[in-house]
Image: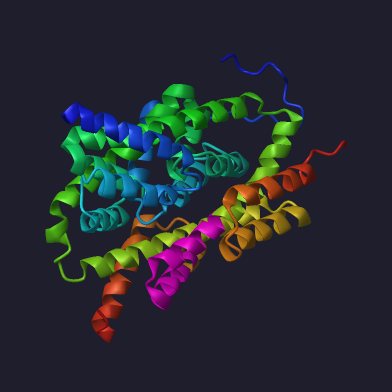
Amino acid sequence: MAPSEQPPLDSPPRIKPHVSLLAIYRTFFWIGLFSFGGGLSAWTHREIVLLRGWMTNEEFFSGYSLGQILPGVNSTNLAVYVGQHLRGAVGAVTALGAMLTGPFVVVILAAITYDRLSTIPGFQIAMQGVAAAAIGLLVRMAITAGQNAARGVVSVIVMAATFVAIAILKLPLLLVAAVMAPISVYASWPRAQ
Amino acid sequence: MHDNVLLKLILIISPLSLVAIGGAASIYAPLQHQTVDVEQWLSAREFLNMFAVARVTPGPGSMLTTLIGWKAAGLPGALVATLALYTLPCLICYTVAQAWNRYRGTKWHTALERGLAPLGVGFVAAAALALLRLADTGPLAWAVAALVAALLTWIPKLHPLLCLALGGALFVAVHLVFGVS
């Protein structure tokens, strides 16, 4: 558990912001409660990186990749990763619990009232629209992230190839990661100055 | 008997949680088989309804598991099913994240971080396309997604909730005007 004694070799030392558990809980509670149709990671990115500056883009997206490769649900893996990064074990539990509190209550209430809700005219259609808009959030996040992660020709090719391999060729994510990760990491190895 | 159901929930969901790589959708088929065909906690029709509920409510799509627990054994079932789905993967993720952050600043860590970031971007973009295909609501969904992405480019501080509300309103408006149901 002791913090690393090695001095940073390459990246400039970054002062990690101190974030209170209450702030973590509040942030992830709202992320969980208001994320519809798969917009969780986009919302998390916006709150954690863009608005609060708790993490850098690279910290966030490398964690995002880890969460995708590891088993489990991506959004909650991401919550655990962010929580761990900010406050260790307590932070991880706080972020995860906060992200699930709202949805847990809402989903059960919705299941109870499902038959009634679905008879409201336009309800289903409106929810489809909400889901479509949530995908728009995700698209915007991919664009922002792409601009930030584009460090050179290789990284741009890796992004495009990863996208095509999964979305168009429908190759398994793990296989794509196994091929692309070594190439990309090799290309990003810090060069001797 | 009730305890038995809770135990069964854990025994069914925990192993599945470990093979849910890249999202919970990958375990829906075995989950349906176990809970509908084998245990008969709910009917196929109910399973689909619960899937729909989980889709339109906030949170991870995996809240479907919570609802299955709810159908099987009420509130304790819902709690147990949720914990069973998240506990093991989160422990693994925590361990990896901890190791990951401990070596922050070393050369290979920097390389891994810079190298994995573009992969993450590819994953996100692919997820957006996969969700658009899943949504199965045609060009309107594509248009709304593009509009929201453009709006956020134009006004980066725009609140996501406004975007979601706009999407819902646009869908309803289009269906009212063109009378598609």
Q: How is the image coloured?
A: rainbow
Residue at x 29% of width, y 52% of height: B54
- Depth order, front residue of A114/B72: B72
Asked if residue A149 lies left or right of residue B126, the reply is: right
Q: Residue most toward the left?
A: A116
Q: Is residue A84 magenta?
A: no
Expressed as whole percent of the image width and height from the top left, the position of residue B38 reads: 27, 45
Q: Is any part of residue A26 visible from this angle?
A: no
Q: Quadrant of residue A108?
A: top left
Q: Residue most toward the front?
A: B38
In terms of secondary structure, what is the magenta stretch mainly?
helix
Q: Residue most toward the top?
A: A2
Asked if residue A32 lies left or right of residue A141, the reply is: left
Residue at x 28% of width, y 33% of height: B8
Of the 4 image quadrants, the one containing the C terminus of chain A is top right
Question: Where A123 falls versus A79 (above or below)?
Answer: below
Which span of residues is magenta-colored?
A: B124-149
Expressed as whole percent of the image width and height from the top left, the position of residue B130 reads: 48, 62
